[in-house]
Amino acid sequence: MEAAQFLLVCPLACLAGFVDAVAGGGGLISLPAYLMAGLPAHVAIGTNKLSSALGTALAVGRFARRGYVPWKRALVLAVGSLAGSAAGASLALGLEEGTFRAIMLVILPVTAAYLLWGKGLREDRPPFPPGKTFAIALGVALGVGLYDGFYGPGTGTFLILLLTAAAHLPLATANGTAKVLNLTTNLTGLALFWLHGQVLLPLGLAAGACGLVGNWLGTAFFLDKGAKGVKPIMLGVLGIFFLKILLE
């Protein structure tokens, strides 16, 4: 590994940690950073899961202290995320990078359009009965867990969007739950990529330390600004990553 890789990846990992704590989707910044540093696609994905897991763990702790993590529901949903992530990571290890990019060229503009014209981040949605909320949230956990194991960037964003729009969770609760699910999928994917020798430990730990700083600042920003600061950041990271894939 070269010093230039650390100089490129670590500052972007800090920014990714900030974005991830606020709106999810920090991987939309950190994974391209690893790729731009010259890492092969599967090594970039595996190392990104290491650094992301460290920052997400910090965010889980801070959201939990504020009471934004419904632990009983979140831990059950995490089982669904774990199963989805394991299946997705196993699939990813056998597929070509071009497959990922083709999927993103469809998913990202659809997500951005929903953010612009949809109502996924409204906080005034009437709650569903508990059973319906849990069933929808479990489907979200399985589906997004599969995606995160398969590729990863945008997982937190998609979780927040779907938990608010489909399951009608309040934004703060959706964000706290998303952090628990995202941590679960990161750790599951990391284990599988690690077993296949696709993780660079020194770079991942250094980037993870920088991501911790970003996550700390981002969590404070979210707890202060709430939904007002979320949508512009989400749109920004989706737009940047879409343009990067399109140019490639």
Image (cartoon, grey):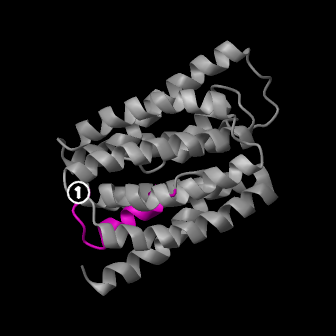
Residue 71: which quarter of the image?
top right
Residue pictured at 66% horizontal, 63% vertical:
218
Is 39 one of the magenta-colored residues? Answer: yes
Left or right: 111, with 98 as reference point: right
Q: Which residue is mark 1?
A: 198
Neighbor class of circle 1 (other Cα within 10 Å; few <14, some 14-19, many 20+) is: many
Residue pictured at 55% horizontal, 27% vertical:
76
Residue 23: x, y in percent? 62, 52
Q: Is residue 225 visible?
A: yes
Residue 16: x, y in percent? 52, 64
**Compared with residue 74, is residue 40 higher up or lower down, i.e. above or below?**
below
Residue range in magenta is 26-41
Residue 53: x, y in percent? 47, 55
Is 161 one of the magenta-colored residues? Answer: no
Q: Amino acid at mark 1?
A: Gln
Residue pictured at 50% horizontal, 39% vertical:
110
**Compared with residue 217, is residue 95 higher up or lower down, i.e. above or below?**
above
**Compared with residue 181, is residue 224 higher up or lower down, i.e. above or below?**
below
Prevailing secondary structure class for the magenta stretch in the rendered image: helix
Q: Secondary structure at mark 1?
A: loop
